[in-house]
Amino acid sequence: MTSLVEQKVVLKAEGISKIYSGTVALRHADFEVRRGAVNVLVGENGAGKSTLMKIIAGVEQPTTGRILIDGAPVELKNSADALRQGIGIVFQELNLFGNLSVAENIFAAREITYGVLGIDHREQERRAAEVLARLQAGIEPGTLVETLRVGQQQLVEIAKAVMLDARILIMDEPTSALSAAEVEILFRVIADLKARGVAIVYISHRLEELIRIGDFVTVLRDGQVTARSRILDIDVPWIVRQMIGSDAKPFAKPDGHVLGPEVFRAEEVCLPRDTGGYLVDHVSLSVRAGEIVGIYGLLGAGRSEFLECVIGDHERASGSIFVEGIKLEAKDVTSRIRHGISLIPEDRQREGLVSTQSVASNLTMASLHKFLRGFQIQSKAETGAVRKAVGDLTIKVSDPAIEVSALSGGNQQKVVIGKALMTGPKVLLMDEPSRGIDVGAKADVFKTMRRLAAEGLGILFVTSDLEEVMALSDRIAVMSNGRLIDVFDRATVTQDQIVEASAVGHRPHPSLQPTQG
């Protein structure tokens, strides 16, 4: 059997530099991709990983440097050139058409036709069903993509890439929205692709999974390659040190501050399912001032839908919402925000940001009424508020007038948090706040959550990461099949109890009011 060291290099990036309007995204980066192996590329948000992958996929052109395939220089002017060379990519940010079906998305730009007679939709759906079954996605090929949740859309992106039969397949954060079970299925697919000789380029902020499935690792920091190794020779602390120049920043721990009175309560919140039953099934939950309550559960547990009901996203939702003991009669999002509830959505690109607008505009768009004097916005007050938010949240941006799309994922997430905080919330809802951000940015976000709680803000956050919910929460609510199964005190609960509760779907839940004192 061929050893990992002897595996053939099928693609090599040599001396790649990329400069955007004076900002150096990559600086003389070298990267090798070996056949039949998982080639891990790792680094903090903004390190240059996605830029390098876009260059290899033909989406971007390097300022200097070259790409070699099988030892010969190639010019990848666009993604079509890359596809002809056998290069496919699963982008970190979803690249789907919401108004088209799953099958139509999988075959977009390479439709199966009857010659000149048009698209063979039946054959597309048949082939799409095969690859979706391989991924155990549980998605019908005719389903409109816009009706799918983020995790399901991620599986459609992966299905698109698998259908390419690429010999080099780039996966940029493919597991960021997947459940643990879906991750296991993806890993089996990756193992199958490796056995067929496909070269996998794999990017993820989940360092433990890199150790598990990777063969080689290349580390980027500030646009430069700082280290390379075989995965067999390193561990997670080694990766962290190469990424950030020091050991990992620990998760922020509870600081022992005294909790205040109840600031938020949801009673008997329900969201009916189109096919019968409930997506959110009579959920009641409360949060005290200064308290962080984590909601844990598997994909499809109804966690995100519950937050959407609270913020007023669903007209058909029922139940009662109270802020500081006052029942909110209005059910629209604007009214809920003005009464002190703010939501940081799971999909920051589609629901949290306007990518064509500046960092400053994104920060203030939900709170512009605060800067109005008559019919005019007081630009000086707005600029001061933006500057304060950038400083408080350590958003890495040279000028808030820059488009928010130019920022790294971690800094974009900080902008979404800043936008929510500028509305002056009394309770902050956070849906997967660490999705798709690196270990350094994650620590910054968690530190911010603890600081806000210490200042008296009530926080209700959703996560599928067990380590996060254990590290950050004062209490942990577990959901399954739309129901609230149990609420645990973080000080006494174990990880095993949390996992066991998340697998239960029909156990009656106890009283859910917080303990006093």
Image: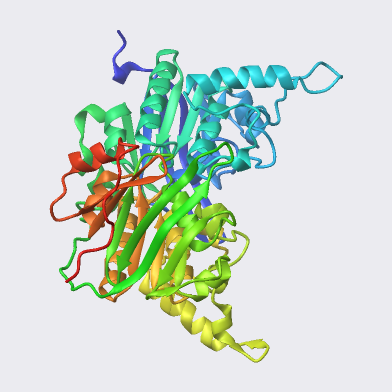
Front-lying residue, 330 or 97? 330
Q: Residue furthest left?
A: 492
Q: Residue at x 39, y 53 (%)?
A: 283
The answer, for residue 96, to whether it is visible in the render is yes
Q: Residue furthest top?
A: 1
Tell me which corner region of the image, top left, top right, bottom left or bottom right, holds residue 324. Answer: bottom left
Question: Which x, y percent locates residue 177?
Answer: 44, 41
Q: Residue at x 30, y 19 (%)?
A: 4
The answer, for residue 346, to whether it is visible in the render is no
Q: Quadrant of the N terminus?
A: top left
- Report the side of 254 relative to 265 (left or right): left
- Report the side of 453 relative to 428 (left or right): left
Q: Residue furthest right?
A: 116
Question: Which x, y percent locates residue 338?
Answer: 51, 75
Q: Residue at x 63, y 61 (%)?
A: 356
The colour scheme is rainbow
